[in-house]
Image (tube, grey):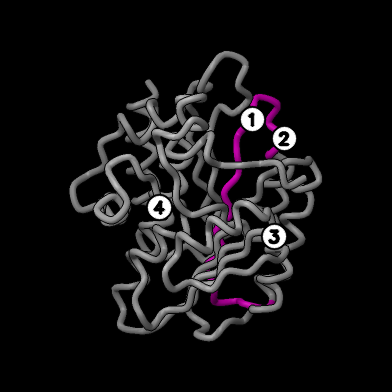
Amino acid sequence: MLSYQHAYHAGNLADLHKHGLLAAMLDYLTRKDKPLSYIETHAGRGLYDLDSAEARKTGEAAAGVDRLALPEGHALARALAAVRARHGARAYPGSPLIAEELLRAGDSLHLAELHPGEQAALTRAVRRARVYRQDGFELAQSLTPPTPRRGLLLCDPSYEVKADYAAVPRHFTRLAKAWNVGILALWYPILRDARHVEMTGALRRAFPEALLSEVGFPPARPGHAMVGSGMFVVNPPYGLAEAAAEITGLIEVQAG
């Protein structure tokens, strides 16, 4: 437990899928002049260096953000440009920094991260979000319904153990009951053994109106288990299905 570090995978095709959809949702939410809450259960370090030893070791960004051309004006492209203007051309923002870039001064940001090294780095990276060294699901349960009630929760566990897959539907059911107007977004890896299928089946039974977006791509290197990326969104905002089709289409062309 607590061994996962995203620096090895930052900027890969799965990140572009996850972050493209996250950015699209935040872009939609901020079009209304009403404050909102953002909660993230497994935030990571927030900021990554694509020239780091970890990133160079896997080379996953080379097949991802280094090659994929986002449409001009896409919310993820705007967030990436803003982060790189401050941190350099090889910086890559995790979801906490994407949220900070796209949200406004009156919005609330709550980030949970248990890994001590990642949590310390996250605290240094963010400018105005509140960072908690706490179990993300416990934090989310304690905050929901948040103030403001309008908003989004992103759940991106490490899936270090298979029990994570069984736990997620239970957590989402409780969170949706406490925060019935909140957008609840879950990212998950698609692995060769398809271990996500039981989890997504349970989620679809519990939330039949949710949006499910999946995209497949070749393994990053020989023997690598991940062959795709998935997002499950409860209470998806207007236009998200189209945004998902756009980003998955770009990834499929890139991976093709």
Question: Disc 1 or disc 3, which is closer to the eye?
Answer: 1
> With 177 as the anchor, is 19 left or right in this view?
left
Nearest to viewer (mark 4 / mark 1): 1
Q: Say which mark, if any, is on residue 241.
A: 4
Q: Is residue 210 visible?
A: no
Q: State the residue at coordinates (40%, 52%).
A: 241
Q: Residue furthest left?
A: 72
Q: Is residue 20 visible?
A: yes
Mark pair 2, 4: CA separation: 24 Å
Left or right: residue 202 versus residue 105 is right
- Lower sequence index among marks 2 and 3: 2
Whole-percent x, y for residue 129 in the image: 48, 71
Q: Secondary structure at mark 2?
A: loop
| Quarter location, residue 12 | top left
Q: Position of residue 39 (x, y in %)?
A: 55, 69
Residue name at image x 42 percent, y 50 percent: 19
Separation (CA) of disc 2 from disc 1: 7 Å
Which range of residues does the magenta coloring cover? 178-196
Percent position of residue 229, x then y: 53, 38
Where 247 falls versus 208 (above or below)?
A: above
Asked whether 147 or 241 is in front, the reply is 147
**Disc 2 target residue:** 195
Dot 3: what SS? helix
Q: Residue beneath label 1, please?
A: 191
SS state under label 1: strand
The residue pinned by badge 3 equals 206
- The CA distance from mark 3 to mark 4 is 19 Å
